[in-house]
Each structure stands twice: as structure tokens, then as C-alpha cells.
Image (cartoon, rainbow, N blue to C red):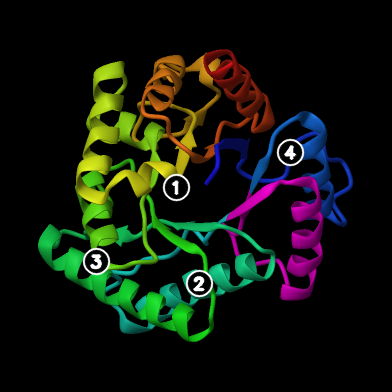
Amino acid sequence: MDRLRFGPAGIPHVVKNKRNSLIEGIKAVKELGLDALEIEFVKGIWLTKEKAKEAGRLARELDVLLTAHAPYYVNLAAKEEEKRRKSIEYVVKSAEVLHAAGGWSVVFHPGWYMKRAPSAVYEMVKKSLAEIVERLKSLSVDVWVRPETMEVKSKFGNLDEVIRLSQEFDMVLPCVDFAHLRYREGWNDRDTFRSVLEKLEKELGRYALDNMHIHVSGIKLDRHGTHLNLLESDMRWRELLEVLKEFNVKGVLISESPNLEEDGLMMKGYWQELTT
């Protein structure tokens, strides 16, 4: 990736025409001065390949990078084989549609421990991810597949786990959600942000920092880990951006704040101050 891009997780709130929301969303992203958009399949894969190709043509024309978030109900370590296979299918289908749109990177929530040993769950997730990668290669679908760092400790997906998965497969790199790491590990200062990037570079190489997929928002430290707007939270987002600049990170940073584009624009504005 040539630079760090910024965009919202979903269609910007300024879009009022919901009939063709992705097309309008891409236009709005460009008009706002952002340069990425994450397509949210969190409640289901609602985009056809035909519509994805149409959106992709516009995104290329306007230089808007497209990513996607697979459905929330993915669990690659499900105890029931039917649920595990459906979860594989959700990730594959999300990647296929994103690829049709010329997109770059698909994120998913890996799964749950469900009172099982983390090592056993890791092996189940690894097995499922191997099937996903094999399927995507057979379909000539060329997008990054991104297990996300998760917030609560009952969910599979600490930083070490998503890094280790990325070492196993050549199509896989982490999605680093700094709000989730704030919740799960308490990491919320310059030193801990730096430690994340140092670990990524040490374990995965400079290539990982040149192709990062990042989620940022505030987060409420309740039992749900509710996303918050940055200025309503304690998230030290300016320090985070300063560390990203220090490491010359490239890729995409997606705002998952409830206000979507507002925090995306605020972060991009500060990034421009740091880099110009």
C-alpha cells in the first residue's frame, strides 16, 4: 500500500438515498475527503456480485479503497460442524463479493473459546482458515483475509493468536482493532501502541506494517465493550496516530465510532498535520 488511508465502517451518515447506498456511500466518502470505505456485511451479505462490480468501477475511478467486514456470527471454532461450515461460507462469500468490487481486505471475528483450552480452539480456527484460504485460491479470489483482535477474553483473538495465524498462511494478516485491545488488555498509551507495532514487525516483517488494516474508535469499559465516539472516550487516539507515523504505517484505518465519518475525518486531519 502506498499510504495510510482513512474511511468509515459503513455508509457515511450524510447519505440519505438508501436505495443505492453503496454507490452513494463511495461518492460521499470522496466528497468528504476520505479515501476508504468498509462494506458492512455484519448482519448478512446483502451485496450481489453485479452490484459489487458497479461499485468497484466507481471506487477505482474515485480512488476509494474498499474493504469488508464479514458477518458477526462467524465462529470458525464452533462445536457444531454445521455452524463451522456455515462460518467458513460466510467468510468465503464476503471475500468473493469484495473481490468482485476490486476490494482489498476482508475482516472477520474468528470465534469463541467456549470454556475450551485456547490451544485446542487455535487448532480449530487454523483448520477452518486453511479451508477458507484453499477455497479462495481455487476461486482466484485475491484479497487479504483478516482475523480481528477481539475485545472480551471469552473470544478467540488476542494479538498473539492473530499474528500466529498470519504466520501460517500467505493470504492472512491481522486486523488490529485498537479499541478492542484497549478493552481486552488495557493498552491505551504510546508505549503499548508502540509495542503492538514492534511485535507485528518482529513476527511478520515490515510487509505487515506496509499493509495494515486498523480499526479505531472509543470503547466503553462495560461488560459489552460498546463503541464510543473518540471525544466521548478515553482513547488516546492522537498518541496512536503519532506512533503509526513513527513506524511509517501504510494500509487502511477504519473509523468504527458511532459517528463514522466525523471521527474518520478528525483522525485524517490530525494525520495530515503529522505528515505534512
Q: Nearer the viewer, mark 3 or mark 1?
A: 1
Q: CA distance from mark 3 to mark 2?
A: 21 Å
Q: Nearer the viewer, mark 2 or mark 1?
A: 1
The local crowd at label 2, few if under 14, some if 14 to 19, many if 20 or more residues have their Cα within 10 Å, is: many
Q: Amino acid at mark 3?
A: Glu
Q: CA distance from mark 2 to mark 4?
A: 24 Å
Q: Amino acid at mark 1?
A: Asn
User: Residue at image x 56%, y 57%?
Assistant: 104
**Residue 156 visible in the displayed image:** no
The residue identified by callout 2 is 90
Q: Nearer the viewer, mark 4 or mark 3?
A: 3
Q: Is residue 73 left or right of residue 13?
A: left
User: Residue at image x 39%, y 75%?
Assistant: 133
Q: Nearer the viewer, mark 3 or mark 2?
A: 3
- Magenta range is 38-67
Q: Amino acid at mark 4?
A: Pro
The local crowd at label 4, few if under 14, some if 14 to 19, many if 20 or more residues have their Cα within 10 Å, is: many
Q: CA distance from mark 3 to mark 1?
A: 17 Å
Q: Is residue 40 magenta?
A: yes
Q: Amino acid at mark 2?
A: Tyr
Q: Secondary structure at mark 4?
A: loop
Q: Is residue 155 left or right of residue 71?
A: left
Q: Is residue 122 left or right of residue 83?
A: left
Q: CA distance from mark 4 to mark 3?
A: 35 Å
The residue identified by callout 4 is 12
Instruction: Note whether 132 is above or below 264 in the view shown.
Output: below
The residue identified by callout 1 is 211
The local crowd at label 3, few if under 14, some if 14 to 19, many if 20 or more residues have their Cα within 10 Å, is: few
**Residue 74 visible in the displayed image:** yes
The residue identified by callout 3 is 168
